Amino acid sequence: MEPERRFAVAPADAGARLDQWLARELGLSRAYARKLVADERVLLAGRPAAKGTALRAGEEVVVLPYARPEEPPAPNADLELRVVASAGGLVAIDKPAGQAVHPLAHAERDTALNAFLARFPAAAGVGEGGLRSGVVHRLDPGTSGVLVFARDDAAWRAAREAFRSGRVRKRYVALVHGAFAGAREVELRLESRGDHVRVVRDGGRRAASQIRALRTGEAESLVEVEMRTGVRHQIRATLAHLGFPVVGDRVYGSSVSLDRHWLHAESLEWDGFAARAAVPPELG
C-alpha cells in the first residue's frame, strides 16, 4: 500500500483538472487516478473530491493510502482452494459457483485468485500481474469447474499461447431447457453488451462450439459442449440462441430461478496437461 500523501497545489497548476494532475503527480494512468477519486481516496478541504475539479493554487490535496495497480490482491487463506491438477508451473482448481476468478479492486478478498495466492504466493506478479496475477483464463462467476492459474511467467506464456492457438480442449456440461438431440457444430459472432452478449451478423468475435446431447428429455436435456474458441458467455449465449437456454440462466432466457445457472467446466487439457472436476452436488 502507498502511504498517505499531502500536496500543495503550485501556482503553475492552478486550473488543472484534478484527475490529470493526480496522474502526473502519482505516476498513474488517468483511468486509475479517476478510480482513486471515485473510491474517495482523494480529499480537498477535508472532503472527497470530484474528478473534474479545477485546482486552485495553494490548496491542499490529500491522497489517502491506496494500492497501486501493479500490486497483487491480498491472499486469503480462509478461502477453500480445491486443487485438481498441478504440473509444469500450472495449477488447476475446482472453482465453486458464485466465486469470481479475480478481484476488480484491491479491497475484494473472496475471489479464486485471493485463495490461490494464499497457497502459492510466488505467483504474485506473474503474467498480467496486479489483480490478474497468474490468471490463465476465466470462468463466469456463476459457472463452476476447472480453472487454471500459472505459478511462473514461463508457464503462463506457454498456457496463453496454447489458448490462443486453439490447442486447448475445453469440455463443459449443461442442463438446458427443451429437447436437444443429436450433435451439431455451431459458429456465431458474439458482441458484448453490458452484462450480456448478443449474436450479430457482422463484427463481434467468432464463437465456435460443438454441442452433443448426453440425455434428451421433453422439458430438459443434458448436453456436452466443447468450446473451439473462448468468447465471453459463449456457451450460454449460443445455447440460448439455438432455443435451449441453460437452466437457471435468467440473463439468457431461463424461466427457472436457481442460486446458480446449470453450467459446469468439467475438463480441460492441452499438451499433456489435463484436469477434471466432477459435477458438484448442488447440480445433482
Image: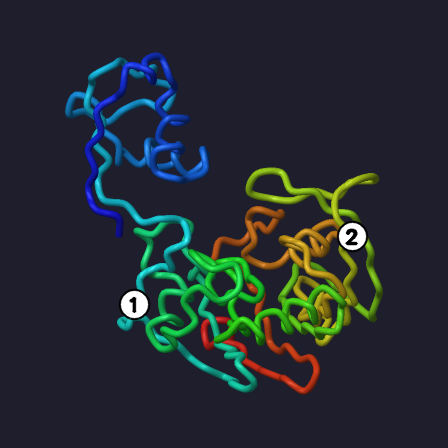
Q: Count every numbered label the image shows and give the total.
A: 2
The residue at 52%/59% (across/down) is 128
Q: Can you tell which mark lies on residue 76?
A: 1
Kind of residue indicated by mark 1: Asn
Q: Which residue is mark 2?
A: 206
Q: Is residue 283 left or right of residue 103?
A: right
The foreground one among 200 and 180 is 200
Crowd band around label 2 with a 10 angstrom C-alpha radius: few (<14), some (14–19), many (20+)? some
Q: Position of residue 261 (x, y in %)?
A: 53, 59
Q: Tell me the distance, in whole angstroms, between the alpha carbons under discs 1 and 2.
A: 37 Å
Q: Which residue shows up at 57% across the image and 71% down it?
A: 156
**Side (left or right) of 119 relative to 273:** left
Placement of 194 over or under 109, stated as above or below: above
Residue 239, horizontal then vertical, whole percent = 71, 56
Q: Quadrant of residue 116?
A: bottom left
Secondary element type, mark 2: strand
Front tag of 1 and 2: 1
Q: Which mark is first along the chain, 2 or 1?
A: 1
Kind of element beneath mark 1: loop
Q: Which mark is residue 233?
A: none
Which residue appears at 77% of the width and 71% of the height? Answer: 212
**Does residue 113 sit above or below 54 in this rendering?**
below
Residue type, label 2:
Arg
Q: Nearer the viewer, residue 89 or 20?
A: 20
Nearer-the-camera pick, 56 or 233: 56
Image-quadrant location for residue 208: bottom right
In x, y percent, where is residue 139?
A: 55, 62
